[in-house]
Amino acid sequence: MAKDFSTMDDCNPSHNQSIHDLSNPLRRTILRGGLATTISSLLAPLGAVSLSGCSTTPTGIGPMLGFKSVTMNDLDTVTVPDGYRVQVLYRWGDAVGIAGNMPAYKSDASNTATEQEAQAGMHHDGIHYFPLDGSQRGLLVMNHEYTDDGLLHVGGMRDWSAEKVAKAQAAMGVSVIEIVNRGNSWEVVRPSRFARRVTATTPMLITGPARGHARLRTRDDASGAVVLGTVNNCAHGFTPWGTYLTCEENFNGYFNGPDKPDADQARWGLKKGGAGYRWHEFDERFDVARHPNEYNRFGWVVEIDPMDPTSTPVKRTALGRAAHEGAHVTQTRDGRVVVYMGEDSRFEYIYKFVSRDAVRPGGAKANADLLDHGTLYVARFNAGGRGEWIELTQGKNGLTAERGFASQGDVVISTRQASDLVGATKMDRPEWIASDAKTGWVYCTLTNNATRGKPGFPGVDAANPRVENTMGNIIRWKEDGDFAATTFAWNHFVMAGNPVLDRADAKGNVKGDQLGSPDGLWVDGRGVLWIETDISTSTLGKGDYAATPNNGMYAADTTTGEIRRFLVGPRGCELTGVIMTPDMKSLFVNIQHPGEPASERSNPDEVMKVSTWPDKARPRSATIVITRADGGVIGA
């Protein structure tokens, strides 16, 4: 039987958590005051320690993976192991909980843009739990990545209008909700003083080396310091001082490109019509021909203070501009933060940022500029299992004015081009990154890259060894010493794929349950690696994926390499965010785009032929919470 950790929050119930409390729920809370930086810096590179007599190493849990694998299926529901319960907590269209503004969801999609601003956005993605009262009450902060306009609007994209653009912009961004455990179930607190939506029109500040840069100035913002909104928010991160990082991924698809893109626009794949969202027809700032600098103001990591709904989000340009999948934060021995970031595009890169300064006591306000100063690096994975971090600083490694980098602002705005120039390793779509503070290993999912090695595309290399990599893999590295090191050792934790296939691009070496296209990633307090898959809905159940009709979530014992299937999602969905409460008894998971095999612009009736999850009606992305019937630790 698992040990009961429910009393551990009583050790320091009012204390601010360090990064290790947040990323490893079994580490103890520490003071907001002067000892915070010292203690958290000691925790970073070490295993379990004890503070104030509170053990940080769980005992009596037993084997890492204490559940029976779920059988793969094509059911339109969420399947979990015997003895576990699933509750749908927060669906697209549910009220966030803003006092005096809690519109009900309308199943015919007739909610207005104004109502959508106070409701859950579409396509839940990265997620984090910020405790208010340990494991019984807290804030869930989550991303809403993009919109399915066929589902979002009455009539889909027919009769396109300014109102539909406004509603689409309101349906992405970030939700902050307050939740409470009532004993047998969780519920959203409504109203809540913390409730908030951040959308594609929320005012935001621009800080760091690109602030005020000529390429960020627009007709409506001559200062280059204020921008409206955040878009395509994929994965996330969180800081030692209690803030949330949301990451702008494929933002370029919302912009209508010029007839003939210049070299920079071509590097970002800007094209006429964008990805078909048509925002530019009623919001001209998304028309690059009319406002050529607006798209430079997206592709950043955005910091949000969930504890202060009046605070202004901040785009942190020192972390570089990319199709950011996420921003995983850890700490060095001397208390500085390290932010690992993947860029989910074919042949793009893995980055890390090391702050100049150590975390200061005093929470978010005391660390308001910490992510504005530091060093940005990009990874090169060499043969023989060794690698290095190449510094992306103006004047170094060929990043000179003669080559188009006259300032650090130029470097961070054109991070992709800087990485090209210094010879970084082009990866197979690096997505989520997670680290294990006990072992020092940092993991990154490489989802797939079917064009690797094809004519006209880069060939294989040591880190990306598969031609036409359709299955993906998980790479990992361990820094040489501290997380701020500039060299590391690396290997492949697992090559995903079907063990019965003989082709090198598809045969996996999974010890346990088959998986493909790994995406979401998180290491829990015991050191279990949770893996979520994002197999394209156009290939699920077909060809190499014939044995995989639905996406799922898996748990990996990193000491033995064993992988077990913990969850199978409904039809057409992707498994995205994952996080637990500190006592590890409630697991939050996001179910994204159920029913996606139908076109995003299609009639809802076509989508509903694939999925009607979770309400036997128009499908809705949602956050679920999983608990054990016996109240025990998840997965143990």
Image (spheres, rainbow, N blue to C red):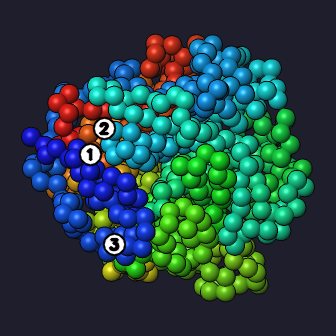
Labels 3 and 2: the sequence-earlier one: 3
Residue where numbered disc 2 is placed: 586
Q: Is mark 1 on a helix, strand or loop?
A: loop
Residue where numbered disc 1 is placed: 583
Determine the residue positioned at 61% across, 45% down: 309
Residue nearest the viewer, comparing 440 with 238: 238
Mark 2 packing: few (<14 Cα in 10 Å), some, or many (20+)?
many
Mark 3 packing: few (<14 Cα in 10 Å), some, or many (20+)?
some
Q: Where is residue 227 in the image (x, y as percent from the top left)?
A: 76, 54
Q: Marks 1/3: CA distance?
A: 21 Å
Q: Which amino acid does label 3 sit on?
A: Ile
Q: Do the residues labelled 1 and 2 touch (CB within 8 Å)?
A: yes
Mark 1 packing: few (<14 Cα in 10 Å), some, or many (20+)?
many
Labels 1 and 3: the sequence-earlier one: 3
Q: Where is residue 325 in the image (x, y as percent from the top left)?
A: 53, 53
Q: Are marks 3 and 2 in contact (CB under 8 Å)?
A: no
Please state if 321 lies on the left or on the right of 476 as rendered.
right
Looking at the rendered image, the quarter that the N terminus falls into is top left
Please state if 85 lies on the left or on the right of 239 as rendered.
left
Q: Marks 1/2: CA distance?
A: 8 Å
Residue where numbered disc 3 is placed: 39
The correct choice, above or below, for 306 with respect to 441 in the image is: above
Q: Marks 3/2: CA distance?
A: 27 Å
Q: Where is residue 470 in the image (x, y as percent from the top left)?
A: 43, 47
